[in-house]
Amino acid sequence: MNSKEEKEQLITDFYTAFINKDAEKMANCYTDDIVFNDPVFKNLKGEEARDMWRMLLGSATDLKVSFSNVEVIGNKGSANWEAIYPFSKTGNTVHNKIKANFEFENGKIVRHTDDFDLWKWAGMALGMSGKLLGWTSFVQNKIKDTAQQTLDKYRAKKKEA
């Protein structure tokens, strides 16, 4: 895959699969050695990155995803996407706005980095405590640790099955 159009289509396919809650189609857009990063999940590699999407979509209720501004320049691409969903622990509605950056290799995504404001996310997800304390490294590290532990438990359960 070398053309700009094919890379744009790959990003479009990824988010269309997301909208359709098809984690396997999303996973198939990644290379075997994908590296995923966002403000919560750091350096997820390979199957761990694919499992994050499987976990998130497997537990998602009332998730609405949209995307726009797909752009590709050379071997890099980007898109804006939004997710609206109830946060499972509080029931609070989260409307997260994310900037995604991609790198391509052999017709697939080899690097995927999502960027969003974790403090703003904490305020929506956790309510007043997130608004007041979501900027602190203590709260942000707790969010990251809890998310990673949840992914680790998901992956352990998957291995047992």
Image (cartoon, rainbow, N blue to C red):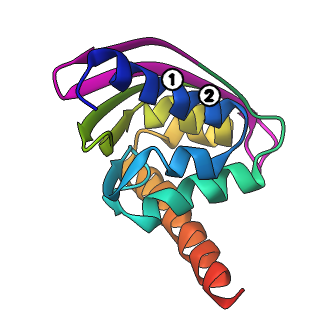
Q: Main secondary structure of the magenta part?
A: strand
On residue 12, the disc is 1
Marks 1/2: CA distance? 6 Å
Residue 65 position in % (x across, y down): 66, 26
Residue type, label 1 = Thr
Residue at 29% x, 24% y: name it.
77
Q: Residue flagged by tag 2: what amino acid is it?
A: Thr
Residue furthest top as drawn: 69
Say if 110 sits above or below 77 in the image. below
Based on the displayed image, in which of its 4 quarters is residue 58 positioned?
Answer: bottom right
**Which quadrant is the N terminus positioned in?**
top left
What stretch of residues is rendered in magenta? 67-95
- Per the image, the residue denoted by label 2 is 16
| Circles 1, 2 touching at the beta carbon (< 8 Å) | yes
Q: Position of residue 5 (x, y in %)?
A: 35, 15
**Residue 111 appears in which quarter of the rendering?**
top left
Residue situated in front as seen by the camera: 111 or 40: 111
155 with respect to 42 (left or right): right
